[in-house]
Image (spheres, grey):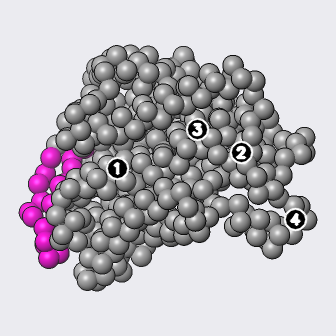
Amino acid sequence: MRIGIGIVLLSDLIIRATALTAHYTQDGILPVSLLQEFDYKPLRWSFHYLNDSFAYQAVLFFLNGIVALLLIVGYRTRLFTFLSWIFLISLQNRNPFIQQSGDDLLRLILLWALFMPWGNFYSWDSKKTTSSVKNYFSLASLGYLLLIVSVYIFSAIQKTSPEWRTEGTALYYTLSLDQLKIGLGDWLYQHPSLMKALTFLVFYYFEILVPLLLLIPFKNQMFRAVCVFSLILLHIGISLNVYVGLFFMIGITSSLGLLPSSVMNWFDKKILKLKIRFSDSFYESNLNFVLKTSVNCFLVFLISFCLTYNLGYIPSFKYVLADKMVYVTNSLKLEQYWGMFSPNVYKTDGWYIYRGIKQNDSIWDIYNDKPGLDKTKPVDIDKMYPTDRWRKFAENFQKNDYNFMRPYYCKYLIREWNKKHPENKIAGLNIIFLLEESLPDYKTAPLKEQNTCLCYENEPK
């Protein structure tokens, strides 16, 4: 799990770096001053706030990459787990409008891993330890187990619509979203009976039965092996059908710590050809009594906090966290939301068109790079977004709650276009969203045209 999570962190950093100027600097879509003015949260922190320049952000990205590499190789693992967690909080806080649920899971995995010995094997640190124990149980491992269970159980609890529970149309509506549908999804979309069966399979087996099986205290070696391989299969299926960025990799790697030691011993002997005898006993922490008690008290608090936080999304649950707990939530970045595609799947989709306005008032379509304006629906809407980070931003950009970002995005696009096309500059830009609503039986409602932004290069923001 450590190696997998480290690879995910490094991959995420590389993907984010492709939009470093756009997403993390003063010349992009969200300067720090704008974030703090319109989306202030008490005790939310980030050392990415300290300087908005490209050079400063690039240095932080470079250091972050070094930390991720050292986590992968398992050098001073606990220290670099801590630094990975700190860097990830800072990075996610710098631009919260490009995040998805997988980011919450990735961040919380690192928090629980701080208290578990995931550097004892396949690592540089393993050269300095004589531990042969692969079984591990503690409050930290319980918290980690409950985190994985929570992702799927609370996702299922919040899926209250008939699309999931009785009609079985959730996958149909998901694949009707052209910005999400990819690869195998194009083929699957043509088979309504199969989509219905898979909807019920995802809801009743993967999101309800699998996490419950993980909690069974007896024969858990067998149950955990079945559950982990089921979750891996689920996320591979997601990656083949839906454009979700690194979500599937986060889902797969975060479950690997639940693999039973019997599976890993077989892997070591048959695949890695390691001639090591592994103990069937349990790993024991060597902390002194006072420190161990303090850590355990914190872990009890953390488990209780996270469970209460998730239960708070259920309307019938009467007990919610006190308002003052927001300081704990923000300082440790414990917010989490597992209600993916709930209570029902979005039924509205669409695509943007970019109406460039030249000095002589003529129109230039800057996406298709041609005169006039082409409102034809693109064949592959998902290809309009170079990464899932951009797709998530486009999803939020459409919402009126985030209209404070619109002029900055417009001006960023104008600057980028004029930099790359000095012979064909535009003076202004009108971003239009063509909204398409999915209806049953492969039908759609008439398109609705929404003006999301109109600005000029030289006007104040």
Asked whether residue 164 appears in the rendered view, the answer is: yes
Q: Please report contact status of discs 1 and 2: CB closer than 8 Å, yes or no.
A: no
Query: In 3D space, how far apart are the residues under numbered discs 1 and 3 (Cα atoms)?
Result: 21 Å
Image position, residue 17 (x, y; %): 57, 41
Q: Which secondary structure type mostly characterizes the magenta part of the structure?
A: strand
> Along the polypeptide, which appears first: circle 3 or circle 2?
2
Task: Report which residue position mark 3 lands on.
Answer: 139
Q: Name the residue nearer the viewer: 6 or 407.
A: 6
Can you give x and y, in whole percent of width and height, for residue 452 in the image?
Answer: 20, 40
| Residue depicted at x 33% and y 67% | 204
Q: Which mark is residue 118?
A: 2
| Mark 1 → mark 2, Cα distance in angstroms | 27 Å
Query: What amino acid does circle 1 point to?
Result: Phe
Which badge, 4 or 2, is on the more N-terminal residue? 2
Q: Is residue 3 left or right of residue 139?
A: right
- Circle 3 residues within 10 Å: few <14, some 14–19, many ≥20: some
Q: Is residue 261 above or below residue 74?
A: below
What residue do we see at 24% from left, 38% from top? 317
The tag earlier along the polypeptide, 1 or 4, is 1
- In the picture of the structure, the residue carrying the numbered disc 4 is 274
Is label 3 in contact with label 4 (beta carbons under 8 Å)? no
Apparent side of residue 62 relative to residue 406 in the rendered image (left or right): right
Of badges 3 and 2, the one in the foreground is 3
Q: Quadrant of residue 307?
A: top left
User: Residues in magenta?
Assistant: 429-450
Q: Regarding mark 1 in the picture, which secondary structure is present there?
A: helix
What residue would you read off at disc 1? 154
Label located before the other in sequence (1 or 3) = 3
Q: Please say if the residues under marks 1 and 4 sit with CB atoms less than 8 Å apart.
A: no
Rounded to the nearest whole Å, what is the CA distance between mark 4 and mark 2?
18 Å
**Looking at numbered disc 3 in the image, what kind of residue is underneath it?**
Leu
